[in-house]
Image (cartoon, rainbow, N blue to C red):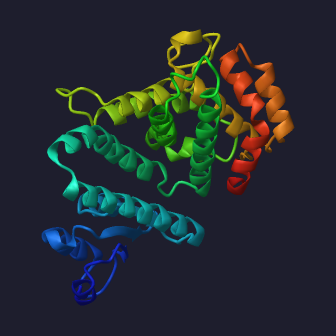
Amino acid sequence: MEFVEKNLDLDLIILDLNMPVMNGFEVLQKLKSDEKYAGIRVIILTNYDEIDNEIRGLELGAVDYIRKPVNIRSLRIRIDIHLKLKQMQRQVEEDNVVLDRKVAIATKELVTARDITIQALVGLLEARNLESYNHTMRTQLMMKKLCEHLSQKAKYRDIMTEGYIMELTTTTPLHDIGKVGVPDSILLKPGKLTPEEYEEMKKHVGYGVTALKSNLDPTAETPSFINTALEIINYHHEKYDGSGYPNKTKGKEIPLPGRLMAIIDVYDALISKRVYKEAFSFEEANAIIRKDTGSHFDPDIAEAFLEITSEIEKIVLPYMN
């Protein structure tokens, strides 16, 4: 605490809970007690059997936790994510100093949506597995590339504005946020799911919608940014022929964000190795997308996606296992 007192510009503390003299909870309470420490983020270290400690630490102001034994690669990714979030937070704070009321009102939607996104993203990337981070990066990059390509087509030119592409790209990481509600025994099962387990896994869509809506003010208009996120979450497992879930929505009745996310999510699953399957080659994945065009995928979007698969391959390779 003496060191912190002399270095109030600290960005991040990695804090063990089990320490002599002053334990981690006491440090968190001290940091929480004074506004001058508000800019310091804390990641707590816990053991696998310390669920209550994780919850208590988060309640006391920690922004994330990681379980021992520490995976250094995972920890480095966490640190990178939180430093980027801190940088973004600092930028917002600096902007608010110079913005007048008119601009502040105009940016309120973005700030609110950003805060919700950040909270959900951190939860999504918690200590489940490293592949969650890679999956997020790949799908986000694919969404941006696909939307930019669609924006060059007459049919989508007016829809795919720069602002809407940013909304879609930024909310892509939220598509599977509901999986935080799926038990570890199912989510991390080292094998193929049983029919009963698969039905439980499918509930992640509803969990995600509920989680995001719970952060909204029911008396205020929902920002378009959040509506886009909800459409991605709720519809990314629907199929163009109506055989998907959870609502068997069909064709163009599926909102555009859901139709976009459907092809991106499936493609990423195909090219990724899983405990129950090997990764398909890019050529094999392309063939499957082509075969399922019109049944699983919107024909227009699938055609556009297949036009840029060579570019897709290049941008996702750095995030492959």
Rendered-image quadrant of the C terminus: bottom right
318 or 129, nearer to the observer:
318
Rendered-image quadrant of the N terminus: bottom left
Q: Describe residue 55's horizontal placement relative to residue 148 as left or right.
A: left
Task: Give the residue drawn at x 50%, y 43%.
Answer: 173
Looking at the image, is 130 positioned above or below residue 141? below
Q: How many marks?
A: 0
Looking at the image, is 200 positioned above or below residue 125? above
Q: Describe residue 86's horizontal placement relative to residue 287 as left or right.
A: left
Looking at the image, is 20 positioned above or below residue 97? below
Looking at the image, is 279 positioned above or below residue 204? below
Task: Give the residue drawn at x 35%, y 36%.
Answer: 211
Q: Position of residue 215 (x, y in %)?
A: 27, 38
Q: Is residue 63 visible?
A: yes
Task: Give the residue drawn at x 27%, y 88%.
Answer: 3
Q: Describe residue 313's horizontal placement relative to residue 3 as left or right.
A: right
Q: Describe residue 182's horizontal placement relative to residue 1 as left or right.
A: right
Task: Give the residue drawn at x 38%, y 63%.
Answer: 87
Quadrant in the picture for residue 156: top right
Q: Can residue 321 be seen in this view?
A: no
